[in-house]
Structure formats: structure tokens, C-alpha cells
Image (cartoon, grey):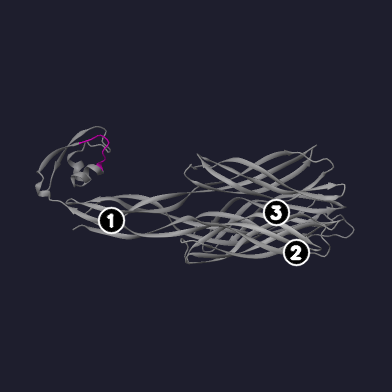
Amino acid sequence: MSNLQFQTLSSLSRRFIGKIQTAESVRISVKTEIAQVLSVGVDSAINSYEASRGEVSFYGKTNIKFLYSDGTTVLSSGYNADFTASMASDLLDTDSKLTFDVVTVDSKVDVNANTATLTILLEITAYAYVTESVTYLASGEDVFCKTESVELLQAVDIVNLPIVIDEELNASRNITTVLLAESSLCVADYTCINGILHISGKAVARLTYVSDGNIVTDTLPFAFERELDATGIDADSQLKLTLTPKNTKVRLDISEDEVNTAFTVEITATARVEALKIGVTDVVSDAYGTGCDFEFERKCVVTTLPCGSVVETKRTTSNLPLDAGKRVLTAVNVGAVVTKCQSLERRASVEGVVYATVLYATEVGTESAQLELPFAETVNVDYLMPRCASFANVTVTDFTVKDNGGLQAETELCISIESERDETISVIVSAEELPFDKSQLPAIEVCLAHKGETLWQLAKGLHMSEEDLLAVNPEITNPLEQDARIVVYNKI
């Protein structure tokens, strides 16, 4: 009897868990009567979750930036609201590690005197790293085994690290009143060495303020570098980093009897780190003995592996008609949503929409209009293949609107691509021995081998080792370049 050795193989794969829409209602009360709502900016993120068998509950926070007019003056207000939701999936258990993407689908406002009721519709997409374990054939005594080395995603750790990016900046004009503070972050590089996560990139602060009765927006980019405590993250892991701003605050450096342009911006964000541990494992793909064959039962295991990543900057210009009697002031609540990301050969195509609220000056005061500009860009990604799945994150790092006889919008996009591929690995989970009687074979025989056959195929068909076959047939090529006669000495 052949002695086959079996081991346990554990592999992880990243799986789509589900997509839900959830609505939240938020009431904002201000000191003056709301004559007109000019813009509503909504940023939402999942802060924590609890996974159980078949379900996950998650908890998030929505940051609201509210711009309105009381009839004579443009004012602003900010508000934070909590939300909860849940999602069911048979793939989930208590050890599941999940990531979430949150998009604001729609927001509506109802006004009553000095109170605005916001109805916000969020779309939440969840992914989980799912573990699959299987007992597989790893080796055998007195058995010839053909092994293959396969890559496996063996472990993953997801860590959410708080990060604060602050910078002293100067506005272009005197700051009378701050209306809105927005920000965007574009990561250029990151490494984890000795438990310290080093992040560098470009930050952009967008400050909308009143200066001597005029509404002004300054877009102020600056480079940043930060080091975060990442103790526990394996230095050999491959990292995926997503940096999400949560809140932007400004602190004015006010000087009496002087022009006030200096301020400090403080961007509070979350760095989501996915640390992937990838290993190489040898699995037996075929086996035979000198006196037996095997009938195998096989099972497929799926593992998810990285497939290339890149960050690239693109600039676009859009021209739109402008109604007569309107003068462009500025644009606020600027952002972007990705609607499609497709993998191609060594590049990815990304489609989406840049959105903003444009403020206009008219004869009756300040008005606003929603602006949506579709974009389609192609980004070069080394090693990317069409069978990979690509995911894009797009950040608007510059957005300006101008009145050139029409509305001209210039946009700078920071496009980050992360790609992955699912690999299916076939392993042997059980084997039934099929013996045969070698005593019926002649001591010496000559066999005809065909072009293209491999050394393994020939040795298996003859129930002998590859070494013994080569010893008496040293002219054999692997695979055979042409038909050949092979001499076999059977050990009886």
C-alpha cells in the first residue's frame, strides 16, 4: 500500500459581500431664518463593524457642510450625524475582515424657518476576506509525486490608523468670515519599516471665505509626509493604503489692525491599511507508484493576489453655457464618483463624474446650481491584464470655474488604481489506489513515444521513475521533439 501524506491548506480570497442603500434624516437648526439653501456637502465613512455568522453590523459618521442665505448674507453651518446599518451574507463569520466603500447617492433638503431637514441616501458596498481550508495531498512515501509551486494569500490584517495633517497657509485675500473648509488627499508613496508607516503625498485645502463682502475660494496645495505607528504589521506584507479625509478645520491667525490672511488647516483622516501576506506552497498535481495508479478526487481553491497598482494625475477642461445675468463666484463641495473601472492590457480605463456646487451672483442675490461633469481616463498600470479586477479611487486635487463668456471648469484628478486577480488552484483531496500486476510485463520491452509527450507522462505510463527512464534512454528530450522508440527494463 502506498503511504500518502495529507496536509491542511488555508487560503484567503477577497469577496464581494453586498451593496445596500440606507437613508438617514438629519435636522440642522441655525440662528437665522433660512431663505435659501445654497449647497449641502456630505462625507460619510464607516468607523467600525461587528461581524457574526452570516451578518455584519456597521457604524459610521456623516460630516455635513451646509451653506445657506438668510436673504442678505451667505452663511454656513456644520453638523456630524451617526448612522448604523447591517448586511447579510453566508460568507461572513466572526473572524471576517471587511472593507467598506460609502457613496452619497442623493441628498434633499426641506426648510422650515430656521431649521433644515436633510434626507441623505447612502450606498454602501462591502468586501470581505474569506478563508477557505482544505485537506490536500502533499507528498507520499514510495510514490512518485509531481508538485507545483503556487502563490497563496495566506493572511490579511486590516488596520485603520488615525492621521492628522496640518499646515500653515496664507489666503490670497483678507479673511473676514470662513464659510467652508474642504480638503483632498492624494498619496504618492508609502512604506512600512520597523513598525513605522511612512506616508507621503499631496494635500489640497479649499478655503471658501468672505473677503470685504466678496465670496472667494482659494485652492492651496501642499506636500505632506507623516509617520504612523504601525506596530503589528508584518514587514514582509504587501500593503494597500486608502487615505480618507473625515473632517477639515481651519484656525485663523488673527492680527488686530492688520490684513488677516494667515490660517492653519487641520485635516483629520483615516489611513486604512490592508496588509497582505503572500506565501508559496507546493501542492501535488499528480502521482503514481511502481505498482499502482490512483484515482483522485480534486477540489478547487480560490485565492486573491495583487495585480498591479499606480497613482496618476490627469487634467480636464469642460465648457458649458452660462445663463445671461449670472456671474460666477466660485465652486464648493467638490468631489468625484467612479462609475466604472475596467482592466485592459497594461492599462485601466476609469469613468466617473466630477460634481460641484457653483455659486452665482445675480440681480436678486446669490444663487447656486449643481454641476456634474463626466470624465473618462486611461491610466497605465504595469503588469495589468484584462483578467484582473481593477478598483479606482479618484480625488479632485484642483477645481476652478471661470466666466469666459460661458462656464469653463478646469479639473485636476488624482487617480489611484488597485488591481487584483483570483487564481484557482486544483488540489487532490482524496486518492483511491488502483494496483496492477507487474509480473505480466516482459523483462525488456520497446515502446513508441510520441512527439510532445513529457518525461513525467512517459514515466507515469511505464510506472518507473524519471531517473530510471533517462538512465537507459539518455537521448530523450523533455518534451519529446519527435516520435521515438524507448527501451524499458521492467523490474519484476
Q: Position of residue 106 (x, y in %)?
A: 67, 54
Query: The residue under label 2 is which amino acid type?
Result: Ile
Residue occupying image coordinates x 78% and y 41% = 402
What distance separates the C-alpha of mark 1 from that of mark 2? 67 Å
- Rate crowding at label 1 as few (under 14), some (14 to 19) or many (20 or more) other CA atoms within 10 Å: many
Image spot of residue 345 (x, y percent) = 50, 39
Identify the mark nearer the N-term, 1 or 2.
2
* Amino acid at the residue labelled 1: Ser
* Residue 87 seen in the current view: yes
Q: Amino acid at mark 3?
A: Ser
Labels 1 & 2 near each other (Cβ < 8 A): no
The residue stretch that appears in magenta: 449-455
Q: Please tell me which of labels 2 and 3 falls first in the chain.
A: 2
Query: In the displayed image of the protein, which residue is found farthest to the right?
Result: 257
Q: Is residue 313 left or right of residue 390?
A: right
Q: What residue is shown with label 1?
A: 139
Q: CA distance from mark 2 to mark 3?
A: 23 Å
Residue 131 as seen in the image, left or right of residue 122: left
Is label 3 in a helix, a strand or a loop? strand
Q: Is residue 204 left or right of residue 294?
A: right
> Residue at image x 69%, y 48%?
355
Residue at which label 3 appears: 183
Label 2 belongs to which residue? 28
Q: Camera-side residue: 320 or 159?
A: 320
Which of 213/144 is in front? 213
The spot of residue 471 in percent (x, y) is: 19, 42
Q: Are marks 2 and 3 in contact (CB under 8 Å)?
A: no
* Residue 417 placement (x, y as % from top left): 56, 47
**Can the viewer see residue 492 in this picture?**
no
Secondary structure state at the residue bearing disc 2: strand
